[in-house]
Image: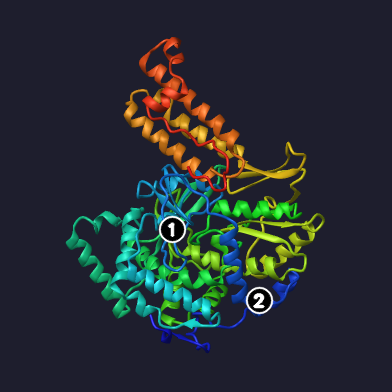
Amino acid sequence: MSPDNVNREPSPCRKGEGCHVPLSNSRAAAQDLGGVSEGDRTGRADRVSRENSRSASATQPAGRGGDSTEPVRAAGVVGVPRSGNDPSESKTGGERRRGTWVNACGHSEGPADGRTEAETLFDRITTPPKVQKLQRTLYRKAKAEPGYRFYSLYGELLRRDVLETAMSAVAGNAGAAGVDGQECSAYTRSDEAWTQWRDRLLEELRTKTYRPSPVRRVRIPKGDGKTRPLGIPTVKDRVVQTAVAMLLLPVWEVDSHPQSYAYRPRRNAQQAMDAIKTALLSGRTEVIDADLSGYFDSIPHRELLRLVARRVSDGRILALIKAWLRAPIVERDPNTGRPTNTGNRRGTPQGGVISPLLANLYLNRLDWQVNERCELRPVLVRYADDFVILSRPGQGPELQARLKRWLERNGLTLNETKTRTLDVRTEGFKFLGFGVSWRHGKSGRNYPHIEPHPKSQQKLRNKLREKLNHWTLWRSVEEVIPEVNRQLKGWGGYFHHANSTRVFDRLNRYAADRLQRWLWRKHGCREALWARLPRRVLQERYGLYRLPTRAAWTQARA
């Protein structure tokens, strides 16, 4: 891609697609948090560059278990890390890729594990060199000129290699079917079917006859008894969204604040926990544990499109994003079982491929506002829509009031029942599945203690009980042990960080005890045989995975 694909001056946008103009409420929102307006971006590119380099050198990305891979370049990566309150809920074992989560099985475990289609889509996808070169070009251009707006991205969308990479990503994920009932297997049965479907899609994009289909909505049960709405686009829509995300990710990566750790290459939840630890050690011990009410479903379309248009002036790309945002929602009525079709005038479907990037873009202003423009100098650490604000003692109530006003001005709602202000020195909190508390060390110094939260530990125990109980005695050892190991590897790969040695040792004993009891019941043996099966024998003879319990957690790898 040549530099001619961008222009220096903002070009007019089509009506309804957003324009490159500052938000009308940006100045007032900035004043709520004690800073300057959103439009003041002087020296921003230099700050981004310095913060990125400082963040990369300060912390090493934590591993996720499995064999190591080469680091992923910010501009040449397709991968997007997963998100959620507890990203360790996967049923699969994980390989490590810095800043991305790689599914060792090469496919999604389905909605039951809490992961969305978008969060698993780019797993195990190798980006061709030409596509990587394109992404690096976009990244370097956006970094060199913060004011540039890309006006010819649609032409790059028509590239065969870009579309092929997007198709491979969607096919590798093997997600659920959309409203048309078509799964990825319908297009991957043969090379001929694959080629024909690709050519038809490419022709629709060239002739501009492509139209997004409605989004199928399913409700995923949550641990608290509530449900999470998950939108499932069709396979064709997922492919086009993936291709667009590949082009927009390197552009938006430049403008993202270093304290945002979700949906970005070379960033993960472990780095977010390291940032929290650094802020606590600097004296910012008062924490605002914030929660947003239905964030993905409440993002205003108009404001979001304006943010997109600040970097992208290509009307065809803007029209695609607008069409995806306003695609009708199809959901079956729980009483009658009939499908209902409702319009979507607000929010972005949680489950769409492009949704995580758009959601991250909308909250990026909050990252810059709190971390760079607030005179109280707090630290905001964000992972998707989960974030905490760390400040010095006594500043929490004022910051929470400012945060509430900023969110209201931008069409969002703070869940006050789940949002709280606390002092970590007297009360701990949970973030991304980790528990953070204040401990008194043996040397006499106090330090922030980070380990897997008791709820996260209990989730693993429940998973192990599901695999090793009297209902599974009919299964062979060769079937059960690999499933147990996948649970242990996936969980341990995520939580292998910080001060987790004792927790891992306890869980190793628990897993061994569960397997001993299961083998004893399966073979009808007496207690004497059970006693002859110590943990070492279970690991060597039966291949039971052992959670690592060595020190140096920040740099350790499972």
- Identify the residue at horizontal 40%, vertical 82% (top origin): 152
Q: Quadrant of residue 502?
A: top right
Q: Please, what is the three-letter code of the amino acid marked with disc 1?
A: Ala
Label annotation for residue 38? 2
User: In this rendering, does residue 509 appear at all?
Assistant: yes
Q: Which comes sooner in the sequence, label 2 or label 1?
A: 2
Is disc 2 placed on a helix, strand or loop? Answer: loop
Q: Which image quadrant: the N terminus? A: bottom left
Looking at the image, which is closer to me, 485 or 354? 485
Residue 354: x %, y % from top left: 45, 65
The image shows residue 313 at horizontal and vertical percentages of 47, 82
| Residue drawn at 45 percent across, 31 percent down | 466
Residue type for callout 2: Glu
The image shows residue 225 at horizontal and vertical percentages of 56, 42
Q: Is residue 429 left or right of residue 251?
A: right
Q: Is residue 456 above or below residue 403?
A: above
**What is the x, y in percent for residue 458?**
56, 35
Residue 260 visible? The answer is no
Q: CA distance from mark 2 to mark 1?
A: 29 Å
On screen, residue 158 above or below 554: below
Q: Secondary structure at mark 1?
A: helix
Q: Are marks 2 and 1 in contact (CB under 8 Å)?
A: no
Q: Is residue 421 left or right of residue 526?
A: right
Numbered-mark total: 2
- Which color scheme is applied? rainbow
